[in-house]
Image: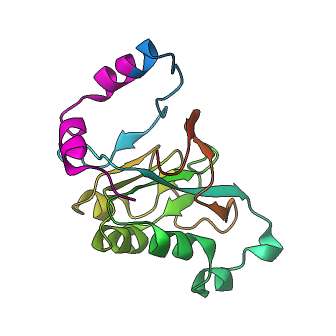
Amino acid sequence: MSMNPETRAKLSTVSTATLCTALFKRGLRNQFIQDVRPLNPALPNMVGEAFTLRYIPAREDLNPLSAFQDRQHPQRVAVEQCPEGAVMVIDSRKDARAASAGSILISRLMKRGARGIVTDGGFRDSPEIAGLDIPAYHNRPSAPTNLTLHHAMDINVPIGCGDAPVFPGM
């Protein structure tokens, strides 16, 4: 994914309210991810093309702790595939009871050059994530693990995040 640097710079100065109004005037009325807040409001706006991850309700027999140790687990694969300059957007079904990601995965995403991460669920390790140099938005802090509620399923497909449609690469 590659966004024109001039476009990125211009968009980084635009407020969410201004951007939503401009989209609304063009007929796009449902483009705002609802009920998310930044972990560190002092960080700059995140601007980048979307790279998505979709969670579905977990089945305990398919989602044991050992699944997270597998390097091919979709959550890990998504972090490794997220392109430099992209924003990872996670559909967690608006359920913050279980973690969408934690500080280790978000640190890795940051080191790989992602511009930010947003979930309509929650993040574990919220204080640590707030100290990272990557914009991160979530609904609220979550439980220590996502074993019982979320199952990472689809990577880089159209999703819904906080009632907004999110298409990869846009």
Query: Quarter-wise, where is residue 146 in the image?
Result: bottom right
**Can you name the residue that lies furthest to the top here?**
25
Q: Is residue 23 left or right of residue 153?
A: left
Query: Quarter-wise, where is residue 152 in the image?
Result: bottom right
Task: Choose between 12 and 124: the one closer to the eye.
Answer: 12
Please, is residue 83 above or below residue 70 in the view? Answer: above
Please, is residue 151 above or below residue 167 in the view? Answer: below
The location of residue 55, given as percent across then percent down, is 65, 57
Q: Is 93 covered by the magenta stretch? A: no
The location of residue 136, given as percent across then percent down, is 35, 52
Q: Residue at x 67, y 81 (%)?
A: 67
Q: Is residue 120 left or right of residue 152?
A: left
Q: Residue at x 48, y 51 (%)?
A: 169
Please, is residue 29 above or below residue 132 in the view? Answer: above
Task: Choose between 16 and 149: the one closer to the eye.
Answer: 16
Q: The magenta stretch spans which residues? A: 1-22
| Magenta segment main secondary structure | helix
Q: Is residue 41 left or right of residue 106?
A: left
Q: Residue at x 52, y 44 (%)?
A: 120
Q: Is 14 covered by the magenta stretch? A: yes
Q: Residue at x 38, y 67 (%)?
A: 106
